[in-house]
Image: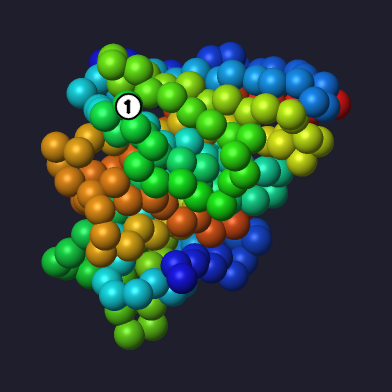
């Protein structure tokens, strides 16, 4: 069965410092991996995805994520955090096998707070 | 280019009532997925529609049903509402043209409160 774990409910970081939001997954075979961000009272906004190729994926707003197959992880990173990055971040996985209409499996989310 | 839109924004119902939520996909998208996000949880997959048919379904009871129209818009219906149905309901659209690698883009959601 597919599952996603985000081991930290909250991450706090000072503005200008690097940030990491952790994600590990369990899926049969090789997955497609996604990061979304949710601001208060808003829907989910797509940040980036890993399909194949380079293990370091670059996305929107300066975010990047590193796919590590041996550790089954897909951690979200940013070299220099901004106060405006404060939001709820979700990691999601889609099974590579099966139909083209794949469902997403989400983690519980990590609340990122960036202090000025 | 309009993104995914959902209506209404908020809805308050009482137990036992029925509700219909609506979603218009992003331009060029033909597939609509619905997710339920309970407070403090990640979104949970309800079902997915393509070519006006339900193609995949998550672990939700038959009280949850849907429909997709020829213009690709979709409705989510929930019958016999329970207090536990209170949640943010998210619609996501994607394109089969891009295949399984396509990204699902989400709407702003409908906040349903069941009293």
Q: Residues within 10 Å of mark 1 (few under 14, many from 20)?
A: some
Residue A30: x, y in percent?
27, 72
Label 1 chain ID: B
Choose between B44 and A76: the one closer to the eye.
B44
Residue B65: x, y in percent?
53, 31
Residue A61 placement: quadrant: top left
- Please tell me which residue is depicted at 32% across the width and 27% down the height of the picture: B52
Left or right position of A82 against B87 = left
Residue A27 placement: quadrant: bottom left
Residue A95: x, y in percent?
32, 62
Residue A75: x, y in percent?
41, 66
Left or right position of B85 against A103 = right
Residue A40 appears in the picture as rendered = no
Q: How many marks?
A: 1
Residue at image mark 1: B52
Residue B5 appears in the picture as rendered = yes
Choose between B45 and A93: the one closer to the eye.
B45
Task: Farthest residue to the right: give it.
Answer: B115
- Please tell me which residue is depicted at 82% across the width and 22% down the height of the picture: B14
Q: Which element is circle 1 on?
A: loop
- Please tell me which residue is depicted at 35% across the width and 17% down the height of the picture: B69
Choose between B8 and A34: the one closer to the eye.
B8
Residue B29 placement: quadrant: top left
Choose between A1 and A108: the one closer to the eye.
A1
Left or right position of B84 against A38 = right
Task: Farthest residue to the front: give it.
Answer: B62
Colour basis: rainbow
A55 w.r.t. B80: above or below = below
- Please tell me which residue is depicted at 59% across the width and 70% down the height of the picture: A7
């Amino acid at each position: 069965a597919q599952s996603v774990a985000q081991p930290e409910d909250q991450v706090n970081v000072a503005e200008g410092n690097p940030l990491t939001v952790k994600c590990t997954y369990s899926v049969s075979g090789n997955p497609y991996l996604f990061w979304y961000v949710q601001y208060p009272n808003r829907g989910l906004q797509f940040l980036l995805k890993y399909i194949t190729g380079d293990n370091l994926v670059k996305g929107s707003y300066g975010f990047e994520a590193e796919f590590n197959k041996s550790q089954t992880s897909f951690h979200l990173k940013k070299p220099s955090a901004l106060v405006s990055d404060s939001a709820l971040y979700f990691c999601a996985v889609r099974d590579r096998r099966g139909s083209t209409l794949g469902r997403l499996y989400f983690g519980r989310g990590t609340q990122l707070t960036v202090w000025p | 280019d309009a993104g995914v839109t959902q209506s209404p924004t908020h809805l308050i119902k009482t137990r036992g009532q029925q509700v219909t939520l609506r979603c218009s996909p992003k331009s060029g998208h033909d597939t609509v997925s619905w997710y339920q996000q309970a407070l403090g949880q990640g979104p949970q997959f309800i079902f997915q529609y393509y070519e006006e048919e339900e193609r995949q379904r998550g672990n939700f009871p038959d009280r949850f049903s849907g429909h997709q129209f020829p213009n690709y818009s979709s409705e989510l219906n929930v019958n016999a509402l329970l207090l536990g149905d209170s949640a943010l309901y998210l619609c996501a659209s994607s394109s089969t043209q891009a295949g399984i690698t396509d990204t699902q883009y989400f709407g702003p959601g409908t906040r349903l409160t069941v009293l």
